[in-house]
Amino acid sequence: MMTEEQRNRAIASLVQAHRTKKPCVQLSTTFPSIEIADSYAISSAMAQLKVEGGSRLIGHKIGLTSKAMQASSQIDEPDYGHLFDDMLIQDGAKVPHADFCVPRVEPELTFILKQPLKGPNVGLIDVLRATDYIVPSIEIIDARVQNPRKIFDTVADNGAAAGLVLGGRPMRSKWGDRGDRTRGRCARPPRNGHCLAGQ
């Protein structure tokens, strides 16, 4: 476990990375004693700083849920992060690259909830009951920690959450449909106005 002083240093490193747009050294390297509880404490402290700065918490993200992304990142479990109102980007807006460290985009499905989900033992049916509708979205991820990262680094870094563009075609998720209406959906982002399908 990290000491309180070490956690504060880790928070300061992430704050500086956000400000300068330059990723900091991996927390797992700087603080070899870091544990996942430390990472969540750091993430919560960073979220509290955002709220104190005027941001509003609007949701949460789960990252690294697919085997392909886990293989790419060499992390074999999901990470988690907070979503704030100032992360929302209007569909069609221009996003300055200089606002981020090393931004990437990923297609996602965003679940808009009509009631809270609280664990433990939350299952598929609980999620479907709590979901009002689902929208396709584009997430901007931006690692404020250098590669290669461990799960301790990604959790502390808010799951690399940096921006979210919500799509305009909501789909209802009816109880008992097992999510079949979203199965098989795919995303093909254009480049300079041209579809990348087949590339």
Image: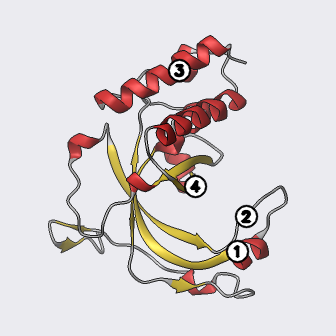
Q: Is residue 130 above or below residue 192?
A: below
Residue at disc 3, secondary structure = helix
Label 2 neighbour load within 10 Å: few <14, some 14-19, many 20+:
some
- Nearest the viewer among 169 and 30 is 169
Q: How far apart are marks 2 and 1 (CA)?
A: 7 Å
Residue 199 figure quarter: bottom left
Residue 73 makes an appearance in the image? no
Choose the circle earlier in sequence order: 4 or 3: 3
Percent x, y for residue 172? Answer: 58, 86
**Which residue: 61% across, 31% down?**
152
Q: Name the residue under label 2.
A: 117
Q: How far apart are marks 2 and 3 (CA)?
A: 30 Å
Choose the circle earlier in sequence order: 2 or 3: 3
Q: How far apart are marks 4 and 3 (CA)?
A: 22 Å
**Which residue: 71% across, 65% down?**
116
The label on residue 10 is 3
Report if the CB atoms under discs 1 and 3 are less than 8 Å apart: no
Can you say which quadrant of the picture contains the N terminus?
top right
The label on residue 60 is 4
Residue at disc 1, secondary structure = helix
Q: In this view, does 66 lie above or below 160?
A: below
Name the amino acid, label 1: Ala
Name the amino acid, label 4: His
Q: Mark 1 points at which residue?
A: 130
Report if the CB atoms under discs 2 and 1 are less than 8 Å apart: yes
Choose the circle earlier in sequence order: 1 or 4: 4
Choose the circle earlier in sequence order: 1 or 3: 3
